[in-house]
Image: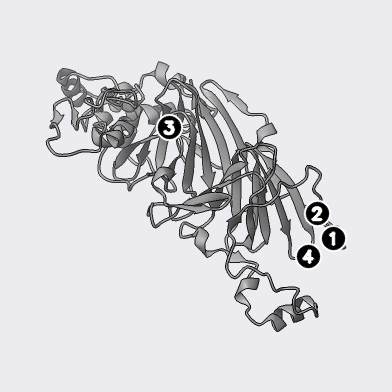
Amino acid sequence: MIPVRSSLLLLAALSRLGAAAPAASSASVSESVSETPTATDSAALAVTTVPFASTDPNEPLWDLDSPDSVPSPVRGSLGAPLLGPDNIPMDLENPDLFAPPTTDNGDTGNSKWPFALSHNRLQTGGWARQENIEVMPIATAMASVDMRLEAGAIRELHWHKTSEWAYVLKGTSQITAVDTEGRNFIANVRAGDLWFFPPGIPHSIQATGDDPEGTEFLLIFDDGAFSEDSTFLTGLHMFPPKAVISKNFQVNNSEAFAHIPDKELYIFPSTVPPDDQQAPVSPQGTIPQSYMFPLSTLNATQLSGGSVKIVDSTIFPISTTIAAAEVTVEPGAMRELHWHPTMDEWSFFIEGTGRVTVFASQSNARTFNYQPGDIGYVPAAMGHYVENTGNTTLKFLEIFNSDRFQDISLNQWLALTPPSLVKAHLNLDDATIAQLSKTKPIVIG
């Protein structure tokens, strides 16, 4: 079942995009009712059973550069000026929450969470802040961590019961891992590149010296209830009997384990790893499928309004639970109106400013504004689009709990549907229907 279930919802969406149905006079309606209808009249009859969608462009009423005096919960004749106290910086960031477009309706759940509101865990050597269902209840399928390591700092050896997908925002991260067969892996993952660890695979992360400031990366976990505070560690500090530790490692020296830390290290400083760091030679060999993918070197698909890079298990075979797209949208352009049939979308905004409208069933719709460092979320099958509302390139990630990237384009769907059906639903003329794209535009200029 598709999310854009009614002509009303389609009309609202098309109206927001400047393609509203043409107006009809009451005379023309009565004529079409009283006479035997032609094909064109049948289309008019279908649409005029309800009012035509508004042609109001419903643009944001202000932006981050607007004066503090501008934000007001008023749009045209709707609303009234605020009389009580207010958080003006939040209003400037969220014009479409404070004075929403008239096409918004009902409730879709909160689809925005700024990492700036996440509690930060400060450590010697770096920090980590997370987002999960505790702070963003709608995000049930995925959770995330934004982590920073100073040069040489280490995220200690650990593993998770979920998979871990990562996108490096800055610097270079050196990762190591060992699989169930005793095969090992080591790689340097640079800005714009990815790594993926399946559930239960023990691994580590260390910042190299490539960037004197170290590294920062985004981690995605395929469970919205995931907590970074619930990872599994090497655990030696939890074994008080030294005899057990000595027996396990077959070391008879009672002092050999005398200086084990008595609690987790989590993030801690260390020396920068050498450029030619090698993993120990394993008699079982190395892991056959790479845990790293060089997304930064992948050629982007250039589109009329921006670009897209798609990475899933078809080109990154080990990544069986996370698929992603890195999208750029130029000023004035938009990521087309689309939906993902069976997958929730978790998004992260890296550069620029954007605006997302989410369409749910029963004609519910809600609009959100995003800045760098913000997280977005769209439940499976809900229609949505992304507009660039700034004067610089908008760059963001679309991430899915799936092994494949899939979406449905509204433009392509209508273009590949018999024109008479499209005309009957939307009262579009032949010229407009002929302009619909039979291939996905993805990002429209």
N-terminal of the two: label 3 or label 2? 2
Residue 2: image quadrant is top left
Q: CA distance from mark 2 to mark 4?
A: 16 Å
**How many residues crowd around disc 2 within 10 Å: few (fewer than 14), some, or many (20 or more)?**
few
The residue carrying mark 1 is 282
Q: On the image, numbered disc 2 is attached to which residue?
A: 279
**Quick one: SS at disc 4?**
loop
Secondary structure of the residue carrying numbered label 2:
loop
Examine the rendering and report whether any part of residue 2 can be seen: no
Residue at label 4? 181
- 194, 48: nearer the viewer: 194
Q: For this view, does 409 lie left or right of residue 50?
A: right
Q: Alpha-carbon distance for marks 4 and 3?
A: 44 Å
Vertical placement of 159 versus 15: above or below? below
Q: Nearer the viewer, mark 2 or mark 4?
A: 2
How far apart are the two marked residues, 2 and 1, measured between alpha carbons? 8 Å
Indicate which disc, 4 or 1, sits on the residue closer to the N terminus: 4
Q: Amino acid at mark 1?
A: Ser
Q: Between tags 1 and 3, which lies in front?
A: 1
Q: Position of residue 260 (x, y in %)?
A: 66, 69
The 10 Å Cα crowd at callout 1, few under 14, some 14 to 19, many 20 or more, is: few
